Amino acid sequence: MEESNEFPDAIIEMYAPLSNQTFSPGRIPFEFNIKNYPFGEEPSHPQLFLITNGADPVGHHSPIFQLEFKEGTYRTVAYLVDSQGLCLKEFGNYVDRDFLVGNSRPFPYSAEPYIALNLPRNNQAYAEGENVIVDFLVIGGDMLMDQLKVVVKLGSQEFEMSDMVPLSISNLPKGEHVIQLELRKQDGKVFDGPFSSVQKSILIQ
């Protein structure tokens, strides 16, 4: 698909949590500052999304909110979307942060690049003939300069992506399908970090 450049100058800044901040289990505050972007002008659709520990994105209508967390180590990616719901991919359009809850330790391989998957969502249903959009971010590395690639696996098929442009998959047969994304190095090896690959199930009805 063509890359969206609706808001190339949009900036999202994360004021809370701080990097590797430790909290007691319970409600944790999140605070963002959003600039050069019409935040709040589309009240029917969330424009700010959070992905936490590789789970499905959750949309938010406010830049300040609280979320409940149990003990553990968490990585959250916050990003803005365009009018089609695709994530903005210019530098400054997204931000990530690790934080700890309770007696927990930082992630291993925390300096490695990794994947944040906007679309599809797990168990997302599509009508027969509808295109399936794969939309992702690679965070912590530059795909071109660092010679990274994302391999999208769907059954016996593989698609190799050298940039973060969304991928549209058509003509999938009815039934359940598993889509897997792997972030690979130049030599083809998958990175070791906990979020270097992600897998979602989808249903064609």
Image: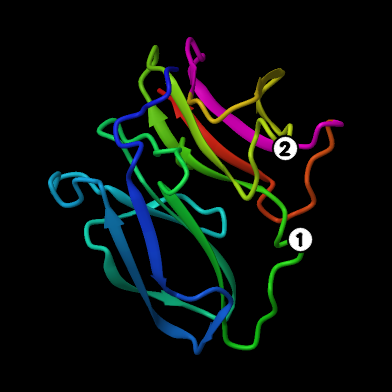
Q: Residue at x 42, y 23 (%)?
A: 3
Q: Nearer the viewer, mark 1 or mark 2?
A: 2
- Pick the quarter of the image with the C terminus: top left
Residue 164 showing in the rendered view: yes
Q: Who's the residue at 59% across and 27% down the image? A: 163
Q: Which residue is mark 1?
A: 109
Quadrant of the image containing the N terminus: top left
Ranked by sequence position, the earlier of labels 1 and 2 is 1
Q: Residue 2's image quarter?
A: top left
> Callout 2, which amino acid?
Asp
Pointer 2: residues within 10 angstroms few (<14), some, or many (20+)?
few
Q: Residue 154 appears at what percent x and percent y?
A: 63, 24
Q: Position of residue 138 (x, y in %)?
A: 59, 42
As for residue 181 lying within the magenta part, the answer is: yes
Placement of 192 over or under 148, stated as above or below:
below
Judged by its main secondary structure, the magenta piece is: strand
The answer to whether residue 123 of the structure is visible from this angle is no
Q: Nearer the viewer, residue 47 or 186?
A: 186
Q: Which element type, helix, strand or loop, lies under badge 1?
A: loop
Q: Which element type, helix, strand or loop, lies under badge 2?
A: loop
**What amino acid is labelled 1 in the image?**
Tyr
Q: CA distance from mark 1 to mark 2?
A: 17 Å
Q: Which residues are magenta?
A: 167-187
Label count reads 2
Q: Position of residue 142 (x, y in %)?
A: 63, 39
| Residue 129 counted in the magenta span | no
Q: Residues within 10 Å of mark 1 (few under 14, many from 20)?
A: few
| Label 1 with label 2: CB-CB less than 8 Å | no
Asked if residue 195 is positioned above or below residue 9 in the image, the reply reads below
Image coordinates for residue 127, horizontal then vertical, percent = 35, 20
Instruction: Specify the label residue 146 is tagged with.
Output: 2
Foreground residue among 94 and 153: 94
